[in-house]
Amino acid sequence: MHPEYRVILIGVHTDSETREHFDETMEELSQLATTSGVVVVDSLVQHLKKPHVATYVGKGKLGEIANVAKNRHAHTLIFNNNLSPTQSREISDSTHCNVVDRTELILDIFAQHARTKQAKLQVEMAQLEYSFTKLKNLWKHLSRIQGGIGFRGPGEKQIEVDRRLIRRRIGILKEKLKTIGQVNQTKRKRRSSFISVALVGYTNAGKSTLFNQLTQENRYTADKLFATLDAKTRRLSGNFNQDVVLTDTIGFIRKLPHKLISSFHSTLQEVVDADLLLHVVDVSHPNLFELIQSVDDVLQEISAYDKDLLMVFNKVDRMEGTHFLFLKKKLAEMYPDHVLISAISGQGMDELENKIVTFIGHTRRAREIRIPAEMTNLKGFIKRSGEVLAEEYDARTHEAILTVKIPRQLYPAIEKQISDFNLKKYIHK
């Protein structure tokens, strides 16, 4: 979008949603719109039992929206929920305005903020997959992909061309992302001997500011939604007595489009593979527990919900008074393992580093591994990847017995290699 665009926000408050929650989502929609670079000139709300099937809002409200848009010289309407193709078309025809729903707005922001090749490909794929379900005004955009005029086959309907173009482009993007994903996987394997820590949290919780504090980096930060899209990994500075890497990741949000999660799966793989997650929360947010739940929902979706996690309540510099005292007591009861910090001022950073050190100590507990004598390569890998405390040889079973401290995430692969080797040896007896 562009700063010259004047927009009106539209929301429908249904019986299934509290007014407080609805107002908060409308405020968030306003922040999203501002982040996209448009000027919000008005906000219109209607209460309905459920959205109108054909026009989302009621017929009377639709007429009011058209009049307000005309009087305020607004040419774009942004809706607080997703719209069906029929709803988008009916609203656009009735108001003579461009119609954008919540997912399209988020995808637009992502498109603006994508910097790396991977992020740009991921955003384009999410846009195309979402557009595939709507096929709204696509030909002008898609014609640039394949040259436009002359590409359409005789007797072929426009929607069939659009679908064919989308499928083809999505296939190309998937192949490109697969190649990038393989490179990233190789990089993660090279870091397998490191303790891996990943920052997760609601968008604008202060993850990138914390990343800069912990790594002495100067990553771009801004007080707006989705300032960071590309995962970035750096070594942690500090006295950890161990190589530790920290990854800053994309921020989450309510109703984060599923297609976006799917498209960014390779980026979110950094979260899945991490040894420890630091869930960064804006403690000054009036509904922080709802934001925590939104992040938990995404972690559940990407199969990272059961990982070791430390709650990091950020922006304590904005808090004071009896309300904060009450909140601190509540947080202590709900999250015994947490830390209060201000990433911008440095308050609480020593305690956070101590918590990370404690975790590392627990993560690298000594374990005993029995390795068949023939698996010399695996034995060498284990010695390179961790600390060998003791080594013995069992002449009866022809196994090396190593007492080691190695990264927790390596154990499943090591155990599988040994199990597969023993099974193969048993079968060939």
Image (cartoon, helix red, strand yellow):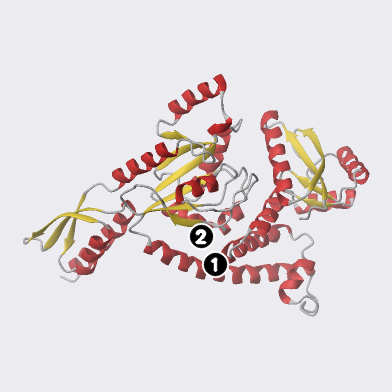
Q: For residue 19, which quarter of the picture?
A: top right
Please give the residue where the numbered disc 1 appears in the rendered image. Answer: 177
Q: For residue 22, which quarter of the picture?
A: top right
Mark 1 and mark 2 in contact (Cβ < 8 Å)? yes
Q: Pick the residue in front: 219 or 355.
A: 219
Q: Position of residue 121 (x, y in %)?
A: 61, 65
Quarter holding the N terminus? bottom right
Q: Pick the residue in front: 375 or 13.
A: 375
Q: Amino acid at mark 2?
A: Ser
Residue 266 image label? 2
Q: In what element is the residue under mark 2?
A: helix
Q: Position of residue 70 (x, y in %)?
A: 92, 46
- From this view, report whether residue 119 is shown above or below residue 32: below
Q: Is residue 342 left or right of residue 429?
A: right
Residue 283 seen in render? no
Residue 415 image label? none
Q: For residue 320, which quarter of the picture?
A: top right
Which residue is at 71% across, 72% downward?
145
How packed mark 1 is, by other alpha carbons closer than 10 Å (few <14, some 14-19, many 20 or more), is: many
Q: In what element is the residue under mark 1?
A: helix
- Label total for image: 2
Which residue is at 24% across, 61% downward?
382
Task: Answer with mark 2 or mark 1, whichever residue precedes in sequence.
Answer: 1
Q: Is residue 239 left or right of residue 347?
A: left
Which residue is at 89% across, 48% downward?
95
Quarter holding the C terminus? bottom left
Instruction: Using the numbered discs, state the Cα–Cα distance from disc 2 to disc 1 in whole angstroms.
Output: 8 Å
Which residue is at 47% across, 57% downward?
233
Q: Position of residue 342 (x, y in %)?
A: 52, 37
Q: Pick the residue in front: 43 or 36.
A: 36
